[in-house]
Image (cartoon, rainbow, N blue to C red):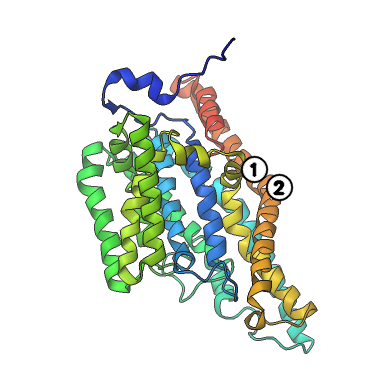
Amino acid sequence: MSHRRRSPSYWDRHRQQGVLVLLGPRPGRRFAALDGLRGLAAMLVVLFHMKWSNHLTGTLFMRNGYLAVDLFFLLSGFIIFANYAHDIADFDRLRRFITLRFFRIYPLHFALLALFAGLEGVKAAAQYMGHSSEQSAFTGGTSLAALGANVLLVHGLHTLSSLSWNLPSWSISCEFAVYILFGLLALGGMLSRQLCVFVITPVCIALYGALALSLGTLNASYDWGIVRAIGGFFLAPLLIVLGRGVPAPSRALGLAEIAAAAGAIAIMAVATGAMVVLVIPLLFLAVCLLQTDEGPVARILQSAAIQYLGRISYSIYMVQMVVLLAASITLKRVFKVDWSTIDPWIGDVMVLAIAGGVVAAASVTFRLIEEPGRALGRLIAARSIKAEAPRCGQKGAASTFRARNANTRGQDD
């Protein structure tokens, strides 16, 4: 009987090196398990925002679902450090990095912001014609001042007094600010391993601790969310350093992955107040282990369905409020039903239906807005490289750039 020869796994290729595996992430490498983890985190945030009566989202675990945003920051920092920490050597490369990051997040943000502004305009017209509404158009979180802050991507930097417009987008504002900070630090040569591990990492830990103790929670957004963004993003260098010491035996890795995942879930299921900060080390450990793409948890995260959620995770995160708003308007205007009067069993059906609607809508925005926007950013960045290559004597720079970005299109790069 013939047997198909199994391709060697990561551990097979490195088992002979001893107990420790030297893992350091390579520029352009795709971390499939982390993609899947991001997809599940995006869906957890969607469920977190479902506040009506039901049997699925009222648990403490779901109410702590906002912590998935900290996982986003941690994952984003890991991918960015792995791909760009040693790539930003001059202002031209800094400009290209910012260009890629801008077109990664802004096209979808702007498109949805325009949609919300258009709906607010319809609301203003209806109020002008005598129709009543709970809140006047273009006031509060949907004011023109808040619209300007959203356009400039500063609405998550303590510039407003409340969440505004597309509510989850506060984290996008914080993330873009962190991209700029990262680029400037990289340009200044301030991201050496020693500085990151012995200076930046303690600062990140202190930021998380101070936020939890001062607010009694980590659920800061438009006001102090930037603290979460900096704390999570800049823990990444320690992830990379510790990742080089992941134990080689696959059984040990599998047990560690299961323990990290179970521990994070358990803390989110029981922790309240400042104690929720204890989930951050476990999320950190999970990312550290899953970067290998090996082990039972990593294999689950690499299933086709979860990988698809990871691929469209940014769109899931951004379009959820559009779908929730559409559901709210339909209930109120068509069926004359208020959220507070929904039977819990009907609420369960709505949870599943709206979650499916979010995924469907995200699939559309991913294809029509997100992917074209990223492609445009890569095109602009690649053209700038081609224009500078003759002057710099770097004939292969453009092709190298395109190859690396082609390999990381599924990542948050």
Q: CA distance from mark 1 to mark 2?
A: 7 Å
**Residue at 60% of width from left, 76% of height from top?**
53
Kindly identify which residue carries mark 2: 368
SS at badge 2: helix
Instruction: Using residue 349 as the reference point, say whether residue 302 is left or right of it.
Output: left
Give how far across and how far down residue 120 sits, in percent: 68, 74
Query: Of the numbered discs in the image, which one, if any, rests on residue 371?
Result: 1
Give how far across and how far down residue 304 sits, in percent: 61, 39
**Residue at 44% of width from left, 46% of height from top?**
76
- Label 1 is placed on what type of residue? Glu
In the rendered picture of this protein, how many numbered marks are placed on residues?
Answer: 2
- Label 2 is placed on what type of residue? Leu
Residue 387 is at least partly visible in this image: no
Give how far across and how far down residue 306 sits, in percent: 58, 44
Query: Of the numbered discs in the image, which one, if any, rests on residue 110?
Result: none
**Residue at 45% of width from left, 64% of height from top?**
61
The N terminus lies in which quarter of the figure?
A: top right
Give how far across and how far down residue 319 sits, in percent: 63, 59
In the rendered image of this protein, does residue 176 appear above or below residue 192? Answer: below
SS at badge 1: helix
- Contact (CB < 8 A) between labels 1 and 2? yes
